[in-house]
Image (cartoon, rainbow, N blue to C red):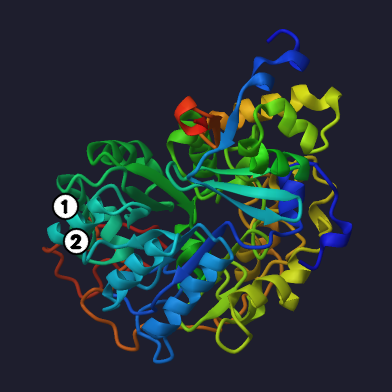
């Protein structure tokens, strides 16, 4: 550990976490970039398998190392991890090596048989992604049929006796109004609801402007989270909302490179799951001497663990609560890393977004080259035709300068 | 219990739960319970030594002495043990185990 010499004894956990740990406490491992879906807001721009994907043996070696480092559990994701042919083998291998697994899936491979297998294992948590409490809202961003797939998986898990599955929801402008419905859905399946923040990472950058919650919705979300407390998981992703008042349960701290990191399908190690970009690449488990070496000695992580200045936020009376928000959200919206979060609840992000900024180009993209039938079509149907069916004029509905007028028969 | 320096726990035999693994950290240790999957942080090295060696001593008091904890702090360490017991990180040693 590089920072040992200056580490104070005692103090708050957050103070200790800022200086980093000998091993992560929240490690995400994306097993594959391949995915059956093409969600509009995919953090990892997944779709196609990367030909350099770690082999089964290489994955086992990573698990062996996690066991040696006493990383007690890992969050497995993708892509869609279950479509890797060796997924179930790796799951068992991890559990047999004292590395518990929580995996995120869209549910496509959670058949009744697999659900029974999962119900029989210890140390395995299943997290089904769902971004709308109704098919209409969910499929709009996750693609046609994805709602039914997720609900079938939840039903299979419940019928197999799997307890306490998680339903993981990315909060958007479209679904903030459905929080109670999500909770009811979770209760119906004996599951726990997990709400996370929409990040402008990966393909999320393309849809963030359209989908990120509006300022008024942020307050609705905050109040809802306060009211539901520890019953709802958040992955500590809403600490930027702490400036509304009391802190939310969990760590109110950016854990990137300090207590959190990501291993991607080719073994690249990034500071956090929302920062798959060359600027946040710490090293590679194959070419840089293993995960432990990257975690403990990489230049990037050492820098992230060094004392940070609050920059433009340091003078804010809420700085202790939100600590400037999410590094990835700032980076991918082209804001300075030592300034306010784009969704700063005091509105400082909005003014920063309105100023001059350059959104960084994506540096990693595994999106499918040609769209498939699973691709979401982010268009909403008009409730009535744009112009009346009985309008005969070729210039019907064309009224330069006039306010928009639609239909006449309604 | 009114006098924290004379918590009855001081005369009891305790042990680190067998389902718990301790991961050393620069500030102390991270304790993980494989059964209930709870994570707890032990923020002082003396507390780490104490919970690791509880099982080797006839009672909590002698474990505290061996860990070099000053007597004035016994109360604080006893309440730490109580809160760790809340998630089964440490537990009283049963007679069967002791026998």
**Residue closer to the observer: A269 or B74:** B74
Q: Is residue A407 visible?
A: no
Residue B95 shown left or right of residue A16 in the figure: left
Which label lies toward us, 2 or 1? 2
Binning the other alpha carbons within 10 Å of mark 2 as few (below 14), some (14 to 19) or many (20 upward) gives: some
Residue at mark 2 to residue at mark 1: CA–CA distance: 9 Å
Residue A21 shown left or right of residue A230 in the figure: right
Across and down, in percent, residue A89 comes to 30, 72
First of labels 2, 1 by sequence position: 2
Element type where label 1 sits in the image: helix
Query: Seen from this angle, which residue lies furthest bottom?
Result: A51
Which residue is found at the position 38% from the left and 78% from the top?
Answer: A32
Which residue is found at the position 45% from the left and 29% from the top?
Answer: B96
Q: Chain of mark 1?
A: A
Across and down, in percent, residue A23 comes to 63, 63
Residue A156's label in the rendered image is 1
Residue B29's label in the rendered image is none
Across and down, in percent, residue A383 comes to 22, 54
Query: Seen from this angle, which residue lies furthest top?
Result: B2
Residue A38 shown left or right of residue A5 in the figure: left
Across and down, in percent, residue A222 comes to 53, 38
Which residue is found at the position 29% from the left and 56% from the top?
Answer: A138
Q: Is residue A22 visible?
A: yes
Residue A146 shown left or right of residue A56 in the figure: left
Q: Quadrant of residue B64?
A: top right
Which residue is found at the position 80% from the left and 45% from the top?
Answer: A316
Q: Chain of mark 2?
A: A
Element type where label 2 sits in the image: helix
| Residue named by callout 2 | A114
Query: Seen from this angle, which residue lies furthest right?
Result: A6
**In contact (CB < 8 Å): disc 2 and disc 1:** yes
């Amino acid at each position: 550990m590089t920072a040992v010499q200056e580490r104070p004894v005692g103090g708050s956990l957050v103070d200790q976490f800022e200086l980093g740990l000998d091993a992560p406490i929240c490690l995400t491992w994306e097993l594959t970039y391949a995915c059956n879906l093409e969600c509009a807001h995919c953090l990892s721009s997944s779709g196609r398998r990367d030909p350099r994907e770690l082999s089964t043996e290489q994955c086992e070696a990573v698990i062996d190392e996690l066991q040696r480092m006493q990383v007690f559990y890992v969050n497995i994701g993708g892509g869609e991890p279950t479509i890797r042919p060796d997924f179930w083998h790796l799951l068992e291998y991890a559990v047999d090596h004292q590395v518990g697994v929580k995996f995120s899936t869209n549910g496509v491979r959670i058949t009744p048989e697999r659900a029974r297998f999962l119900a029989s294992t210890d140390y395995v948590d299943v997290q089904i992604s769902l971004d709308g409490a109704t098919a209409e809202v969910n499929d709009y961003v996750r693609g046609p049929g994805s709602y039914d797939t997720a609900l079938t998986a939840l039903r299979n898990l419940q019928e197999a006796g799997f307890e306490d599955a998680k339903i993981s929801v990315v909060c958007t402008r479209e679904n903030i109004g459905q929080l109670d419905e999500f909770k009811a859905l979770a209760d119906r399946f004996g599951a726990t609801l997990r709400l996370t923040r929409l990040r402008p990472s990966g393909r999320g950058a393309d849809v963030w402007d359209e989908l990120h919650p509006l300022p008024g919705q942020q307050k609705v979300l905050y109040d809802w989270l306060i009211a539901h407390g520890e019953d709802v998981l958040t992955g500590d992703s809403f600490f930027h909302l702490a400036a509304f008042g009391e802190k939310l349960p969990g760590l109110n701290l950016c854990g990137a490179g300090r207590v959190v990191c990501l291993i991607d399908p080719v073994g690249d190690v990034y500071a956090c799951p929302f920062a798959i970009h060359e600027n946040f690449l710490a090293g590679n488990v194959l070419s840089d001497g293993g995960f432990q070496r990257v975690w403990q000695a990489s230049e990037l992580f050492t820098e992230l663990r060094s004392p940070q200045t609050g920059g433009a936020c340091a003078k804010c009376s809420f700085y202790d609560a939100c600590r400037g928000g999410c590094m990835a959200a700032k980076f991918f919206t082209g804001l300075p890393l030592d300034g306010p979060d784009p969704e700063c609840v005091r509105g400082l992000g909005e003014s920063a977004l309105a100023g001059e900024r350059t959104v960084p180009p994506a540096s990693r993209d595994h999106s499918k080259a040609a769209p498939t039938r699973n691709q979401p079509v982010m268009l909403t149907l008009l409730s009535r035709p744009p112009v009346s069916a009985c309008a005969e004029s070729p210039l019907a509905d064309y009224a330069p300068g006039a306010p928009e007028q639609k239909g006449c028969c309604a | 219990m009114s006098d924290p320096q004379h918590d009855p726990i001081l005369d009891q035999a305790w042990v680190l739960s067998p389902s718990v693994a301790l991961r050393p950290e620069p500030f102390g240790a991270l304790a993980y319970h494989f059964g209930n999957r709870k994570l707890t942080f032990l923020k002082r090295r003396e507390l780490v030594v104490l919970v690791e060696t509880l099982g080797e001593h006839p009672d909590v008091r002698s474990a505290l002495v061996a860990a070099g904890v000053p007597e004035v702090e016994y109360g604080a360490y006893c309440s730490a043990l109580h809160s760790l017991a809340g998630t089964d990180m440490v537990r009283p040693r049963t007679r069967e185990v002791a026998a």
